[in-house]
């Protein structure tokens, strides 16, 4: 119940004699990205109408919506623009979720929609001026948050207090401190702003995948059951590694999401099993579905696959093998393979299954091949009986990097470039597009042929009817 958390429908603040009503909203698409959160949101449009009416009754001068709904170039998916159209009493929508940088406000009737990008890269500043009984935009700026922005002593003091709390209440559980140096990187990985922008191999993700596998190996020691595959979805990557020192705070910023069964921040890692057929399907989901649904973009360490983006959807992967970074081996469709992934990945499998109406079904199993019904029962625990958080696995792997001449762990240069996990083949010739088609391709072709046959039949019968009528008319 929201009342247990002190959540209110709205709050009112007064600045320079202006009473401003503030509400918070969660959009439909954003809500769908956390299917196991056990939080149910009412429709954001109907709730915005209800709360706006309440604020008007309170006599506020301005209504501002802090909306985690987002904007899109596709008008039907631009939820905050839809919000502005449907709820005309809102004066300003501060939009989030889609990470959109709006260099100019989107004006919908009397409502301004603004968004400053992502991850605190910009500080948005908007000045509104009275315009009758509403407000209009006077100025709007996105100010880069960098070294040119003057520091605020009060905010700095607040940040230092937070650092103390983070160290004492969280990082100390793992024997870590905020600014500890974990390793050095002799190169920079893909910048955070460019992560997952293309459907190509991402070295950072495979560095993390290796970290997951190594963490399990270190925990299980002589009882280690080999991990065949580690899955890192693009949706959990929130920052990157730059050249130079890599601190504890940097590792956490890369994988900061979620909470585990223990109620402590950070998604835990799970150990599950998939069949070889399902592992191949995971590669196909990445190749075919991720360009449509960004959260389906998967980086699969332990597997090498070649894809041709010019082929029919769900038939883009042309070959796949197990791959340890050096050697490749066959994937047997009916064999069970051990997979390590985070809790988020497991939760999102249900979304992919639902959205594909069961066509793209990955069903995690235990070591005996029995279907898993509760993912939390398969969380990996370290030697201290703590959940193995994905970001902690990364810190341990960074610390375990080979030491350089200064005695400091240094990330291996092999991670500075693709290693052959995902190979893109852009051949567009007819032969390359239609060889070795799988059941999905034949199904799609069958549907297309059926539709064409149906259309041809309709045209045929329409033509016959027209001819009969003309013949009948001529006879008369």
Image: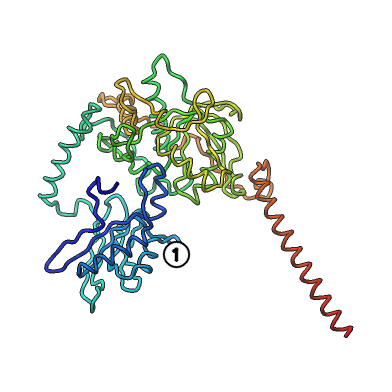
Residue located at (38% from left, 68% from top): 86
Residue 246 sits above or below residue 467 on the image: above
Which residue in the protein does label 1 denote?
Answer: 75
Q: Position of residue 320 (x, y in %)?
A: 58, 34
Residue located at (21% from left, 35% from top): 178
Q: Quadrant of the image for the C terminus?
A: bottom right
Locate residue 283 relative to residue 377 in the image: left or right. right
Q: Position of residue 96 (x, y in %)?
A: 33, 55
Mark 1: give few (<14), some (14-19) or many (20+) Cα within 10 Å.
Answer: few
Residue located at (22% from left, 63% from top): 21
**Residue 325 is at least partly visible in this image:** no
Residue 216 sits above or below residue 39 on the image: above
Q: Nearer the viewer, residue 29 or 11?
A: 11
Image colouring: rainbow
Q: Quadrant of residue 383?
A: top left
Q: Position of residue 210 (x, y in %)?
A: 41, 29
Residue 306 sits above or below residue 102 on the image: above
Locate residue 460 relative to residue 248 in the image: left or right. right
């Amino acid at each position: 119940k929201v009342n247990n958390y002190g959540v209110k429908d709205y709050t009112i603040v007064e600045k320079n004699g202006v009473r401003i009503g503030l509400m918070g909203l969660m959009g439909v698409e954003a809500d769908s990205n956390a299917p196991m959160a056990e939080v149910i949101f009412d429709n954001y449009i109907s709730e915005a109408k209800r709360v706006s009416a309440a604020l008007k009754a309170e006599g506020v001068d301005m209504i501002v919506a802090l909306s985690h709904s987002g904007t899109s170039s596709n008008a039907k998916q631009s939820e905050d623009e839809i919000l502005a159209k449907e709820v005309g009493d809102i004066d300003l929508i501060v939009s989030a979720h889609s990470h959109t940088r709006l260099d100019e406000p989107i004006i919908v009737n009397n409502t301004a929609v603004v968004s400053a990008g992502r991850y605190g890269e910009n500080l948005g500043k908007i000045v509104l001026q009275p315009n009758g009984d509403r407000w209009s935009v006077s100025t709007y700026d996105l100010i880069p948050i960098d070294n040119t922005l003057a520091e605020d002593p009060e905010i700095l003091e607040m940040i230092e207090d937070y650092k103390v709390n983070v160290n004492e209440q969280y990082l100390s559980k793992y024997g870590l401190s905020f600014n500890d140096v974990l390793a050095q990187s002799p190169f920079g990985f893909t910048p955070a702003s460019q992560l997952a922008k293309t459907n190509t191999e991402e070295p950072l993700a495979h560095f993390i995948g290796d970290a997951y596998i190594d963490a399990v190996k270190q925990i299980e020691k002589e009882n280690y059951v080999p991990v065949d595959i580690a899955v890192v979805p693009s949706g959990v990557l929130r920052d990157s590694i730059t050249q130079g020192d890599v601190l504890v705070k940097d590792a956490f910023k890369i994988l900061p999401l979620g909470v585990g069964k223990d109620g402590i921040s950070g998604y835990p890692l799970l150990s599950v099993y998939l069949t070889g057929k399902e592992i191949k399907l995971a590669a196909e989901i990445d190749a075919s579905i991720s360009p449509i649904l960004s959260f389906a973009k998967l980086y699969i360490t332990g597997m090498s696959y070649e894809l041709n983006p010019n082929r029919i959807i769900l038939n883009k992967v042309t070959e796949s093998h197990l791959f340890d970074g050096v050697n490749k081996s066959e994937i047997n469709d009916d064999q069970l393979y051990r997979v390590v992934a985070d809790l988020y990945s497991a939760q999102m499998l249900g979304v992919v299954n639902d959205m594909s109406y069961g066509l793209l079904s990955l069903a995690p199993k235990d070591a005996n091949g029995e279907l898993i019904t509760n993912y939390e029962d398969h969380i990996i625990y370290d030697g201290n009986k703590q959940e193995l958080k994905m970001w902690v696995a990364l810190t341990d792997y960074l610390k375990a990097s080979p030491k350089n001449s200064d005695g400091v762990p240094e990330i291996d240069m092999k991670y500075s470039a693709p290693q052959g996990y995902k190979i893109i083949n852009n051949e567009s010739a007819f032969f390359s597009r239609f060889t070795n088609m799988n059941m999905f391709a034949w199904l799609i072709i069958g549907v297309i042929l059926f539709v064409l046959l149906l259309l041809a039949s309709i045209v045929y019968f329409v033509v016959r009817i027209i001819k009969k009528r003309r013949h009948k008319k001529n006879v008369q």
